[in-house]
């Protein structure tokens, strides 16, 4: 298998022309995680490390939650320590200020008060919110109607109520991960979850995330969100997050003229403080002592929506806001919320790219570094046209994308989201040990009917008739890999065959009419 340096691969992909005149060009063999487009900022020169072995962050959490449940990786750079959750989200970020992520609530441990991406459809969720506001006693039976897709995972109200029939903590399954010490980058891809689970809505969102040390106390967070099925999305929190107020009590927000000001406010959903991203300097920061330029501080760099960093693709035309506010001062919810919202449409087959930075250091240093990085941050749509392929292998009847296993080449799938192609997943039924190749990521999940909780005269009543709830969190389901993408119809150009599986592996009905390269 050819191995490409990320910068060399990027240079190659940018030169590709997919006309017939270019048909002789070699097709690069890559990993599905090679889809990120570089910012051009060099990696930091420190001794950054990454470990997938659990070591507590050293922070004080709610005593009723267990950090080991969420842990995926720990990344340490100069002046910061990052805790990456199983959902590819940030569940801990430590610096000279101590722990910056809130202590957590029992019914949403590292699900809500973390750094993550969130997506929804406002036309679907707003009528349910309005009904719940008028009928608070109906919240429980209408919760499965709520449409909120979290990068982190699901809410776990059963933990509060002692209800064993409800799901335990379930974080968005990680389908592939890789640490590259040369570029100081941790990359992964996860399947995002409907946060209010069980839910009558499915989630068809993949999120690719890369954490990279770019020096000067800065972590570059790059994400690709791809919708492979489901309802159109029109509201993105990218990112959603915030800080522990007891560690970083003062909030400052930048202005377009390069200045900044201390900001206060309460996150109460009725009157949340906000600013157009274009009216800011592209960053927000939190500091222990506003009067000390060397005081420990943390900045979020979200950019100002100018689109300077990526010519050829304008920033989207929808609303783009930075919002902030205090969600509580007690020991349980020690949280200042921050959200960068993007309000624009994204349908099935669409992708968007998110890039932001988290910068730790002294207050003056953090402001300066944030201003330098702001032109490189963005939130916008993205398209993939590459013909790059992901090779898949089989060894002793087991499917794998790890070429080091010395298996036999079995298949070549499209490596990146491509027009006319859908993702192909590798699942395992832990009850039998059977591997399943499928394009339906719910293939092994049970479902059951859910009676319509809305009154017959409600305008949305018909939407929720004859619906089922899904139990994708069932412990017998192993989410093993994203193998790549396959075409739903045979392409007119090129040598393609129908997807078949090795002996001993199950091909789910959803994947029986997919096409891959010969």
Image: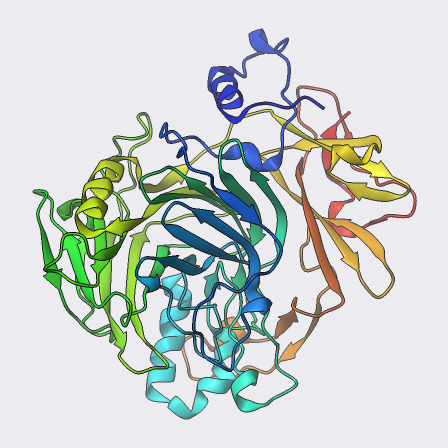
Which of these two is toward me, 109 or 235?
A: 109
Find residue 101 and report its horizontal and vertical position in percent.
Answer: 38, 65
Would residue 429 be seen by someone viewing this image from the given angle? yes
Quarter holding residue 399: top right
- Left or right of residue 362, residue 193 in this image: right
Residue at image position (44%, 78%) is 105
Residue displayed at 44% across by 31% down: 37
In this view, 57 is above or below 484 = below
Q: Position of residue 410 (x, y in %)?
A: 82, 32
Q: Is residue 54 left or right of residue 434?
A: left
Q: Position of residue 323 (x, y in %)?
A: 23, 61
The residue sitting at 74% across, 21% down in the picture is 495
Q: What coloring was used for the rendering?
A: rainbow
Residue 365, placed above or below residue 135:
above
Residue 68, picture quadrant: bottom right
Q: Quadrant of the C terminus?
A: top right
Image location (x, y in percent) of residue 322:
23, 55
Q: How many marks?
A: 0
Q: Farthest bottom residue?
A: 137
Front-lying residue, 435 or 284: 284
Is 422 placed left or right of 343 in the picture? right
* The N terminus - image quarter: top right
């Amino acid at each position: 298998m050819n191995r490409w340096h990320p910068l060399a691969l990027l240079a190659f992909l940018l030169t590709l022309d997919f006309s017939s005149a270019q048909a002789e060009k070699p097709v690069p063999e890559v990993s599905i995680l090679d889809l990120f487009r570089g910012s051009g900022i060099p990696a930091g020169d420190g001794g950054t490390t990454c470990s997938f072995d659990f070591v507590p962050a050293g922070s004080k959490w709610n005593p009723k939650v267990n950090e080991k449940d969420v842990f995926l990786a720990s990344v340490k750079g100069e002046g910061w320590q990052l805790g990456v959750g199983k959902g590819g989200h940030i569940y801990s970020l430590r610096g000279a200020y101590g722990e910056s992520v809130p202590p957590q609530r029992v019914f949403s441990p590292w699900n809500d008060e973390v750094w993550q991406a969130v997506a929804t459809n406002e036309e679907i969720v707003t009528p349910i919110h309005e009904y719940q506001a008028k009928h608070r006693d109906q919240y429980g039976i209408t919760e499965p109607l709520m449409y909120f897709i979290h990068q982190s995972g699901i809410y776990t109200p059963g933990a509060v109520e002692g209800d064993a029939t409800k799901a335990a903590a379930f974080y968005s399954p990680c389908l592939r991960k890789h640490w590259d010490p040369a570029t100081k980058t941790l990359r992964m891809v996860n399947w995002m979850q409907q946060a209010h689970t069980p839910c009558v809505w499915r989630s068809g969102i993949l999120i690719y995330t890369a954490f990279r040390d770019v020096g000067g106390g800065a972590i570059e967070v790059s994400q690709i969100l791809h919708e492979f099925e489901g309802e159109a999305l029109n509201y993105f929190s990218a990112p959603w997050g915030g800080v522990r107020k007891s560690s970083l009590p003062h909030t400052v927000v930048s202005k377009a003229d390069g200045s900044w000001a201390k900001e206060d406010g309460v996150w109460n959903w009725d009157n949340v403080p906000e600013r157009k991203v274009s009216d800011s300097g592209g960053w927000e920061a939190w500091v222990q002592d506003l009067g000390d330029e060397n005081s420990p501080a943390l900045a979020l760099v979200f950019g100002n929506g100018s689109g300077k960093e990526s010519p050829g693709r304008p920033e989207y035309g929808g609303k783009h806001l930075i919002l902030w506010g205090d969600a509580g001062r007690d020991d349980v919810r020690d949280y200042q919320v921050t959200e960068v919202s993007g309000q624009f449409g994204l349908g099935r087959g669409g992708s968007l790219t998110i890039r932001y930075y988290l910068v730790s250091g002294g207050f003056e240093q953090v402001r300066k570094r944030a201003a330098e990085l702001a032109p490189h941050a963005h939130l916008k749509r993205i398209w993939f046209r590459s013909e790059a392929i992901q090779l898949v292998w089989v060894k002793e009847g087991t499917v794998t994308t790890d070429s080091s296993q010395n298996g036999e080449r079995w298949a070549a799938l499209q490596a990146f989201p491509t027009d006319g192609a859908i993702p192909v997943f590798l699942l395992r039924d832990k009850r039998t040990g059977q591997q399943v190749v499928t394009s339906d990521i719910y293939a092994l999940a049970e479902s059951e009917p859910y009676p319509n909780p809305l009154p017959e005269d409600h305008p949305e009543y018909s939407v929720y008739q004859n619906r089922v709830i899904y139990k994708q969190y069932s412990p017998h389901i192993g989410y093993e890999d994203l193998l790549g993408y396959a075409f739903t119809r045979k392409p007119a150009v090129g040598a393609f065959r129908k997807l078949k599986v090795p002996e001993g592996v199950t091909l789910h009905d959803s994947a029986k009419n997919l096409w891959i390269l010969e």
